[in-house]
Amino acid sequence: MKTAHKKIDLKSRHITAADGNVFADLGFSPKEAKALLQDADARIANAKRLKTEAATAITEWIHSNRLTQVAASEILDVSRPRVSDLVNLKLGRFSLDTLVEMLFRTGKNVDLVVR
């Protein structure tokens, strides 16, 4: 028995332009939206800084041990192109978790401080 499927209309009828602050768009007061956006931006900047520090430490380890990217990839348990991304600071492709695992594979200690 063949069942007829009803076609659902998903076309957007109205789009409201964003003003550059998602918190304002969600209805927070201008003052609160500004504070929330500043806090979010600071947290994102901090995460990027941590990723850069981790990648730099791994890259320095590769260079100080005179490793090829292939040799480093074997030790770090990642592909050679991932090592290339790391060395070239293409960090959008890495989670902080992944970078911490790689740091452990280099023999480095990592401490996490939550405030």
Image: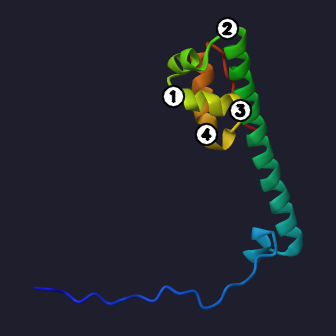
Decide: marks 3, 4 in contact (CB < 8 A)? no
Decide: marks 4, 1 in contact (CB < 8 A)? no
Badge 1 amino acid: Ser
Q: CA distance from mark 3 to mark 2?
A: 18 Å
Within-10-Å neighbours for mark 1: few <14, some 14–19, many 20+: few
Q: Which of labels 4 and 1 is toward the front?
A: 1
Q: Position of residue 61 (x, y in %)?
A: 69, 15
Q: Which residue is mark 3?
A: 88
Q: Is residue 109 left or right of residue 17?
A: left
Q: Position of residue 113 (x, y in %)?
A: 73, 31
Within-10-Å neighbours for mark 4: few <14, some 14–19, many 20+: few
Badge 2 amino acid: Asn
Among the 4 quarters of the image, the one containing residue 3: bottom left
Q: Residue at x 73, y 41 (%)?
A: 47
Secondary structure of the residue carrying numbered label 4 = loop
Q: Residue at x 51, y 27 (%)?
A: 78
Q: CA distance from mark 4 to mark 1?
A: 15 Å
Q: Which of labels 3 and 4 is toward the front?
A: 3
- Taking depth in this image into account, of 30 and 65 the one nearest to the observer is 65
Within-10-Å neighbours for mark 3: few <14, some 14–19, many 20+: few
Identify the disc placed on residue 65: 2
Secondary structure of the residue carrying numbered label 1 = loop
Tell me how many marks there are.
4
Identify the disc placed on residue 79: 1
Badge 3 amino acid: Asn
Decide: marks 3, 2 in contact (CB < 8 A)? no
Q: Would you place residue 61 above or below residue 112 in this image?
A: above
Identify the disc placed on residue 13: none
